[in-house]
Every structure is written in structure tokens, then in C-alpha cells.
Amino acid sequence: MDTQQRSEGDRVVLKRTIGYFSGVSFIITVILGTGIFISPGAVLLCSQLNVGAALVIWTACGIISMAGSLCYAELGTTFPSSGGEYFYIKRGLGPIPAFVFLWTCVVFIRPAATTVQALMFAEYVIQPFFPGCAAPETIKKASAIALIVTVGIINCLSVKWIILAQNMFMVLKLALLTAIIISGIVHLAMGNTSNFDKAFEGKVPNVSQIAEAFYQGMFAFGGWNVLNYFIEEIKNPRKNIPRSIITAMCAVIVFYLLVNISYLTVLTPKEIVSSAAVSVTWADRTIPSVAWIIPVSVAISIFGSLNGGMFMLGRLNYAGSKEGHLPAIISMLHVRYLTPAPAMIVSTIIASIFVIPTDLISLTNYFSFSTWLLVGLTCISLVVLRYREPDLERPYKVFLPIAFAVIAVSIFLVLAPIIQSPKVQYFYALLFMLSSILVYIPFVHFKLQIPYFDKITCHLQLLLEVSPTDIFEDSKTE
């Protein structure tokens, strides 16, 4: 069991253990989940099988993601505190909008996303044991819960283990994608260019279809904001945050484009659209004798993305508690391992509960608009802080029109799914988000105390061996 070394008088604080390379690996492993292996067909379908339009949309999605990440780089270097969008919205727009999104992310969006990834991992791992039939749901759910608990335990015990795992996952993922790209180059050299001849001819997608294609593409790029959730653990954040973001995003954009081109050298647009997992279909066509490598690689990819997502969720809980928006126990760190163990335990429990009722997962689609609403509000906070606090030291400043462009794209991506397919579930999602105010008013604004809650916190603190992050600093100053 790995115990991190402490210094500065045994202070209980998060340690800066994530350097430039690890920052790059976190971004890449979280983004490269299942999107590039499974969903290129969705962008192509929404593009009306127009190969040129699909590749342009992939490129545009990458550029938009890069623009958003540069806005987050300014906020991260200006405010080196964990918590991501929650902290920036609280600073720029006030505590109520911040709490609404803390509530939505902690209670629903992040745990549900973790659950989806865990169930997909279980599907890829278990299905080979049930050839010719579907794997039993009970076994899949039990495996998903086991995975979530395992990742949660690792996150509680050691940050170094998580960093090592993310670095290894990045190398494995990029190695696989490189192999796919090289295969595509070989096929292009052999003259398999028919899908690229007259690439922009054919049906032209309308505005609604372009919006849906962008939505699918932006989903595949999700995770570019991961570093902002654990800035307190990044070495020299002023330099490493912009460098890690720019390196990782450039790499992801290039890999996404080249992998899509590789798919198109082997498969026709119709074959890509009709395939449930385009990477598996591609492998069956190009390397049938070792096609099993792709499902294994997808499982590894999902594990890496889930691992990074759990790490991120724990830090969001930790930051919300430090700001007084969640119970104090959640902001405490383990006195030996210096990890936010209570925050990770809460994240693990909620995500495990989500595995049981599958119908809850289907509701996740109707919360998708809130993700980009969160990004839009964060960039609005950036603009507000530029004008309200112009004298703040900003080691990195993004070109302000970029922030306005991201805000415009966010508005578009928030409204697009609701306008295209208006359903009552979107109203329920909005109602759920606003219900957080019923919690905020009594427990945060008026600081209503629950009887015996302090005693329960004390007992949990002793049981979990956790301490407030400033207890040793206070004792030194007194």
C-alpha cells in the first residue's frame, strides 16, 4: 500500500504530483473513451453520408473543443483551485448558479456517465463468455458495480497509482490508434481512395442535421476540461495547464481525423453507418485473425476514461464541500494517503446505485444539454471576471473573442436537441436542476443544522481516518 510522503510539518493537503506528461495523459484518456471506436457512424449519418462534410464537422468540433479548453486554461491558471466549472461559476456568477450545477453534476450527470461506462466495460468483458446470446443483465450489473468499487478504492488509496494507470492507458490507446492510422495509410497507398473521390458531392445536410452531427462530434471530444477539476494537484499549474491542454487537444484532433480517414479507406459510408461498433467492423475486414484486439482495446479505453472520470468527480465533491455547499466531511483528506477519501466514497456509492435501475440511465440523454450550458456559463464567468476584476494576475489570457465564440456555440448546442426533438423529459431535467434551490435555501443560505449531524461527522472522521485540510496549519499558527 503506497503512502505518499508528506512535508512542511505533516500538513494534510493535496500534493502536487501531476506533471506535464501526466496532465496530457489525463486529458487524452478521458476524451478517448468509446467515441472514436464506436460513434463515427453517427456523425456520418447526420452528415447525410457526405464524407467531406463529416470530416469538416470533426475538424470543427476539435477546433471548438480547443477554444473551450483555452478559455478554461485562463481560468485554471488564474484560480488554481480544484472544482472546475463549479468554482468559476461561483466566483463569476454567484453561489446559486454554482450550487445548481454542483447538485446536477454530483447527484446525476457524473455518476450516470460513470455508470454507462462501467456497463459498457462489463458488456465487452463478459460477452465473449456468452457466445451466440446476450449476457445476463444481473452479471453485467454486478461486474459494473465491482469495477466502480475497485476504481473508487484505488482512488482512495493512492494518487500515484491513478497517475501511473492513466499514463499506461494513454500509451496503449495511442498505440492502437496509431496502428489503425498506419493501416489506413497503407490502404491509401494501395489506391483505396474511392470514398474520397468527389467527397463533397451528394446530399447536403440541413441546419438541423448539422446541429445533430455537431452534437455527436462534441460528445466524442468530451473531457477536455478534466485538468480544471484537480488543479491543486498539478505541478507548476501556470505553465503545465496551457501546455498540457494544447498538446493533448492537438494530438486528439489529429488522431480523430486520421482514424476516421482510415475507417473510410476500408469501409463504405453505408457500412460505417450500419455498424454498431465501427472499429470492430474495421478489424474484421482488415485483421480477422486478431480482430479480438479491438474489443479488448475498447474495454481498456473505457476503463481509462472511467478512471479519470471518477478521479474528476471526487475532486468536484471535494471542492463543493470546501466552499460550504456539501457536508464538511467530504472536504477532508485521509491523514496517511492524502486523498479525498470521503469524496471518493460518496462518488462510488452514488454511481453504484445508478447501476441498479437501468431506466435512470436513459434519462441521462435528456441532461446532455446541461453540459454545454455549464460550459457556456463558465465562459460567461470568464468574461464577467475580465471586466469586474481586471487587475487579477492572469498568467495566461485567452483572446476574448474566442470566449464569445464558445458562448455562442454553447447556446447553439443547448438549444439544438430541445428544438430538434422537444420532449417532456427535458422539462423534467430542468425541474430536477432547479429543485436544488430547495436544498440550497435551508441548508446553505440559512445554514440549517441537522440534529446530531456534527456527532455523525466526528464518528465518520475517526472511522475513515480523515482530517480537515488545514488542521495542521491552524495548529502551527496558534
Image: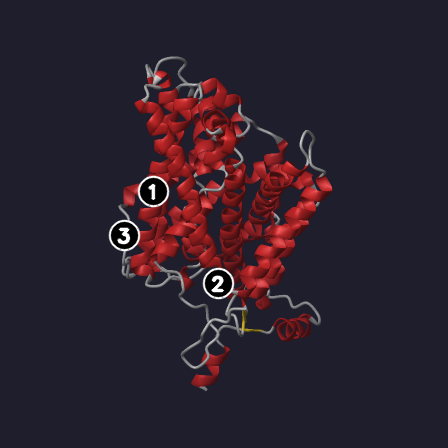
Q: Which residue is drawn at 48% across and 31% down?
A: 279
Horizontal placement of 422 versus 373: left or right? right
Instruction: Give the percent coordinates (x, y) of residue 282.
Output: 47, 27
The earlier-in-sequence mark between 1 and 2 is: 2
Residue 15, position in %: x, y?
43, 68
Q: Name the residue under label 1.
A: 251
State which tag comes first along the sequence, 2 or 3. Answer: 2
Q: Residue furthest bottom?
A: 478
Q: Which amino acid does label 1 sit on?
A: Ala
Do the residues bearing badges 1 and 2 touch, measured as CB atoms within 8 Å?
Answer: no
Is label 3 in a helix, a strand or a loop? Answer: loop
- Identify the residue shown where x is 61% and y is 62%: 443
The mark lying in front, picked from 1 and 3, is 1
Residue linked to disc 2:
159
Mark 1 → mark 2, Cα distance in angstroms: 25 Å
- Seen from the viewer's position, the closer of residues 190 and 252 is 190
Q: Name the residue under label 3.
A: 397
**Spatial separation of the CA atoms under disc 2 and disc 3:** 30 Å
Residue 1, x across and y down, in percent: 55, 69
